[in-house]
Amino acid sequence: MATTEKNREVREEAAAAERCDLPVTGMTCAACAARIERQLNRAPGVRKASVNFATARATVEYAPEETGLREIMGVVEDAGYGIAGTAQATFTVDDSSRPSGSAEPLERYLQSRPGVVGVSFNLGTMEVRVEYLPGATDVPALRRAVEEFGYRVTDVPGASGDTAEAEDVVAKAHAEEYRDLLRRFAVAAVLSLPVLVIAMSHGSIPALNFTGVEWLQLALTTPVVLYSGAQFYRGAWAALRHRAADMNTLIAVGTGAAYLYSVAATLFPGFFAAATGGADHAAHGRAASAPVYFEAAAVIIALVLLGRLLESRAKGKTSDAIRRLIGLQPKTARVLRDGREVDIPVAEVAPGDVVVVRPGEQIAVDGVVTDGNSAVDESMLTGESLPVEKNPGDDVFGATLNKTGAFRFRATKVGKDTALAQIVRLVQEAQGSKAPIARLADVISGIFTPVVLSIAVATFVLWYVLGPTETRFTMALVNFVAVLIIACPCALGLATPTAILVGTGKGAENGILVKGGAALERAHQLTTVVLDKTGTVTQGRPALTDVVATGDVAEDELLRLAASAERGSEHPLGEAIVRGAQERGLTPADAARFRAVAGHGIEAEVDGCAVLLGNARLMRERGVEVPEDAESRAAALAADGKTPMFAAVDGHLAGLIAVADPVKPESAEAVAALKRLGVDVVMLTGDNRRTAEAVAREVGIERVLAEVLPEGKAAEVKRLQQDEKRVVGMVGDGINDAPALAQADVGIALGTGTDVAIEASDVTLIRGDLRGVVTAIALSKATLRTVKQNLFWAFVYNAVGIPVAAGLLYPWTGWLLSPVLASLAMSLSSVSVVTNSLRLRGFQA
């Protein structure tokens, strides 16, 4: 369980480190990801590394003073894999303002910037070439860095400013990888089909039963092995160099053994015919020869490549949520420059720019409305379908859609600081993280290949020793290859990350941002949800609820006088009275002789009337008589969680005015839904017990922890965890909730709350709607159910498939598994796991 001190230490360590996400190419199974992760974690300067097979990304935290991106990428490449997605930017600079006889200072300065891989500054052409990692930095940021150093940038050839650049570069790299797979599969399919027909005919087709047919099979199979299957052999060699083994090892050993044996049997048929009982071919009118298994090598490679193609397409769909989010960002923005409206790339918008938005246009960046009003569709951000009215002073967010009016706003957050960019970042981090349940699969994947190799060798030895003399070598070889090929670490490796990938993406579509797979896993285990009151259960903004006239002054007039007196007050209760009067169409007048009486109320003169507003003690001190029925009415209002204030005009009690923090309309529904899930709901607040219990009764909460100071909230959560053995989710929105959010097993922050609360939480509800807690728990349960289904079928597939391939059933049934069928089963197992995870896209809250 997290503690505040632990979180502080983690934040301090993270502040000294940089983080990068590297798109990795060439991984074929979870063992590949595990090997890259081990190599990265051993690298100097790397604090922490995590490699996700499903997203094909390596997330690395490193100390920039000890290592850099170039060195980290070198570790991945040395392990036998590639890095996709680096980009080049070229700047033409003018050094007149900072003449320099050396390129080294600027190169060193740019090299220290986050996301920069390499820098070259040519003093002859005054060109600065920067290789960088899109997503970690971009062209505008690099340009600003050059200018900050003192050079003037005169030209940026090919600068796009496209905010989707990072994802585009990665997508192009993966698309090229897919096209390469497709080419290799096409060659394998075309050449292996006739080899398969020849092998399956067993001499029954005269046209295919001729002396030297083995040479034809050799000619057709060799390109399949050397071209289509080259990646498997390269991967196996890379693994061997690092004293490791993975799925490439299994495929390479299996197909390599079948191919090399068949080549040898073709070159020296007499020797192998004697060892394998080659009279079979003589029965079909040909000289005795040894059986060959070219079709096993060729068809297995073709089927494995087909499985990779299907798997690649399915895995691509799991990242749809990220692509949809990035696709929402507009490409250009209309800004005011020198009094004119100018269309510029959105990446060039700077904080402080005034942006013009017309009806039907998307808002380019985050900002504050300065002129005009409109209704804005924020459904992409909050999931709420109703447009939100925007007036001067209101916040607007990039990628949301302007509906009706035209307005201008001042840009406040651009680039990676916008709400959309933060959402994309959180979703990417969540999809790149590992859930605790994945550790079991990781452990098994780590030992899987050596175990399978051992089983395959044992299978060969046993069949060679115990099999029929005339066919023992053949049967030993066939079963040896079948065991190697059917074993599938891929299904195990994909079981958890693909489900987490789809689940977190679906959460983002529903306005729920989950920071990691661990939080998504823990959410379904919650037994208690603790709700902060103010701003979480309630709206967090006092509002006028009751106006009770007890004298000769009418209610509206009483409210107008009170609002006029409170215009000079900065107290939230006074502001609520003024807003309430304005909402009822009343116009407060100017007040004179305003005075705040600390802890009791205010007094002022309005339209010649002496107005006194405050508690009963203030009334008594000023000699105003408060009847018993008025005190009873005030007590009843207080019992309902409201704050009653007595109002006197010219020394006589005129009535009561009550203000309260209204309960959010959806709070009671959310509490009821949590109870139906079997979750205990507790309300935690620093407010007085009477008010807290009134609010709790209204929403259906039985247990209230009231009058808890901010520093005591985390202690209350810890007490629930330790003394009552609860798995606790804390929901809050304020700075004072941050320690409790960090202490909880799952911290859930409202997106309408403070940045500190959001940073301390595990889950963020963009809408600030408590029903999102219910959705988050339901999504967690659906995701974990899918993970368990995936793991179950992956385990069952291997637990059943490997013994069958080894020939365990042969003594009783006579069944032996063809290596070709084994390769088909292996390919389908991975695809089935990914397809099962994709069912989460149909999740309904």
Image: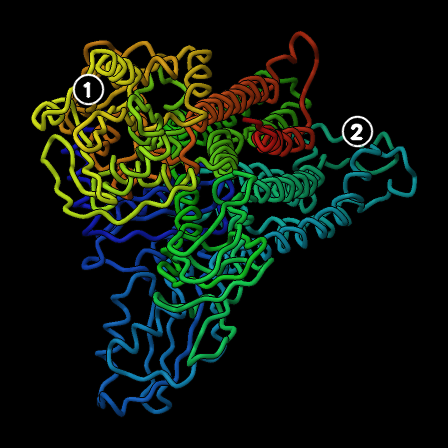
Q: Label 2 belongs to which residue?
A: 280
333 lies above or below 640: below
Mark-to-mark CA distance, 1 and 2: 94 Å
What's the residue at 39%, 57% (across, down)?
Answer: 368
87 lies above or below 554: below
Classify residue 619 as left or right of residue 225. left
Front-most of 814 and 435?
Answer: 435
Q: How far across and down, in percent of the image, does residue 243 sit?
A: 36, 41
513 lies above or below 323: above
402 lies above or below 300: below
What's the residue at 86%, 34% (across, down)?
Answer: 203
What's the residue at 47%, 58% (across, down)?
Answer: 166
N-terminal label among 1 and 2? 2
Q: Quadrant of the C terminus?
A: top right
Q: Is residue 693 visible?
A: no
For badge 1, the amino acid type reads Asn
Classed neighbour count for the residue bearing mark 1: other residues with Cα under 10 Å, few (<14), some (14–19), many (≥20): few
What's the residue at 29%, 72% (across, down)?
Answer: 145
